[in-house]
Image (cartoon, helix red, strand yellow):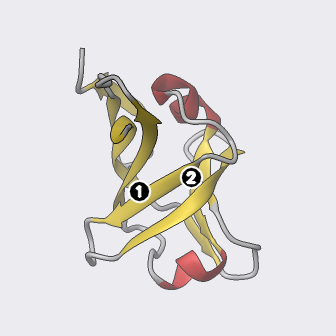
Amino acid sequence: MKCFLHAKIHKATVTEANLNYVGSITIDKHLLELVGISSGEKVLVTNNTNGNRLETYVISGKDGEICMNGAAAHLMKTGNEIIIMAFKWTDKELKPKIILVDKKNKFIKYLTK
């Protein structure tokens, strides 16, 4: 088995960084549906603004919301541009669902067909 990218939210903007929450990343539920990421799923988050990377789990949020919770708020601040990626272990190659969002985390288009 190999680990393949299955979903990616490209160029999202952090809308909040909450140190007082117990871990995770909160992501707009509509974006999660578009790429097939589930609440509780492990994701890799990379920060285009400062180069930081981290792994955490997903919480479904409200429209436009991308909130870094807990210790992740030290690495990813409000206004930072990030990429959110999810992977799956499988014997078959996957065609990932990749979306591009605007600075308000609104869907622009699919980057894969």
**Element class at badge 2:** strand
**Element class at badge 1:** strand
Residue where numbered disc 2 is placed? 42
Residue 92's disc number: none
Position in image of residue 50 (x %, y %)? 27, 78
The numbered mark, 1 or 2, whose residue comes first in the sequence reads 1
Residue where numbered disc 1 is placed? 13
Q: Which residue is rendered at x = 68% and y = 71% of the image?
A: 23
Q: Quadrant of the N terminus?
A: top left
Q: Seen from this angle, which residue lies furthest bottom?
A: 74
Position in image of residue 6 (x %, y %)? 39, 33
Name the amino acid type tagged 1. Answer: Thr
Name the mark nearer the viewer: 1 or 2.
Answer: 2
- Above or below, comparing residue 69 to residue 109 in the picture: below
- Above or below, comparing residue 99 to residue 15 in the picture: above
Give the crowd class for mark 1: few <14, some 14-19, many >=20 residues within 10 Å: many
* Residue 35 placement, left or right of 57: left
Position in image of residue 19 (x %, y %)? 67, 82
Q: Relative to the observer, which residue lies in front, 16 or 38?
A: 38
